[in-house]
Amino acid sequence: MHRAILSAAAALAFAAVAVPGASPSSSSPTRANADSITLRLRYKNGPWLKVLKLPLNRQHLKEFKLCGVWNWPAGKAFTCNGAGAALPQRTVMRMEQTPVANAQKRPESPGWGLVAMTGDPVLRVPLSNTVTGDRWGTFYYRASLRDLSGKVMLTSNRVKLVWRKP
């Protein structure tokens, strides 16, 4: 009888390790090792880029787009559409910039400012020179997957926006 109980306990422990995404605590979010967030910038209807350089005229609003997609297929041309996969349960995707400038400062992200957040697998954000404080220079953006307490589970590639003098 004692041996049967030990065998059953060992089988349950093995099943928890062998099943992808399984965890000892069902209240904590899990993700597969191959998960990723792909991030790109775009000006008007131009191509999606990793680096965007724009002239900054402080008298005019200059809008650009930022897009993060959960599990975008590698090698496929980026379109800012969903790849079909939902975010893991009890997680959110956050879009952040550094330097912070006019973005929202958050204690769990020192040096980065929050510009958008969603529970969806696609985060499209229209931004402008106002969120960067109408300053010439270089700004970086990232997307992060976080649990509901704010803990970072995964970060995207960084993309770069350069405001240059006209």
Image (spheres, rainbow, N blue to C red):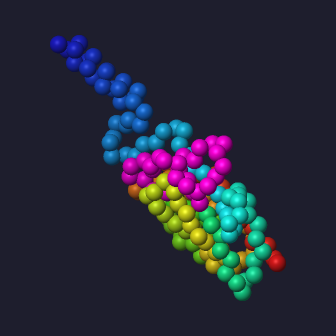
Give the dominant element type of the magenta stretch: helix, strand or loop. Answer: loop
Q: Position of residue 59 (x, y in %)?
A: 72, 87
**Residue 108 is a magenta residue:** no
Query: Is 38 placed left or right of 82 in the picture?
Result: right
Q: Can you see residue 110?
A: no
**26 versus 135 height, above or below:** above
Q: Nearer the viewer, residue 46 or 142?
A: 46
Highlighted range, magenta = 67-93
**Residue 70 is a magenta residue:** yes
Q: Nearer the viewer, residue 80 or 89?
A: 80
**78 versus 139 height, above or below:** above
Q: Residue furthest left?
A: 1
Q: Residue furthest front?
A: 45
**18 versus 114 height, above or below:** above
Q: Can you see residue 90?
A: yes
Q: Residue at x 31, y 21 (%)?
A: 11
Q: Residue at x 43, y 58 (%)?
A: 119
Q: Position of residue 35 (x, y in %)?
A: 53, 43
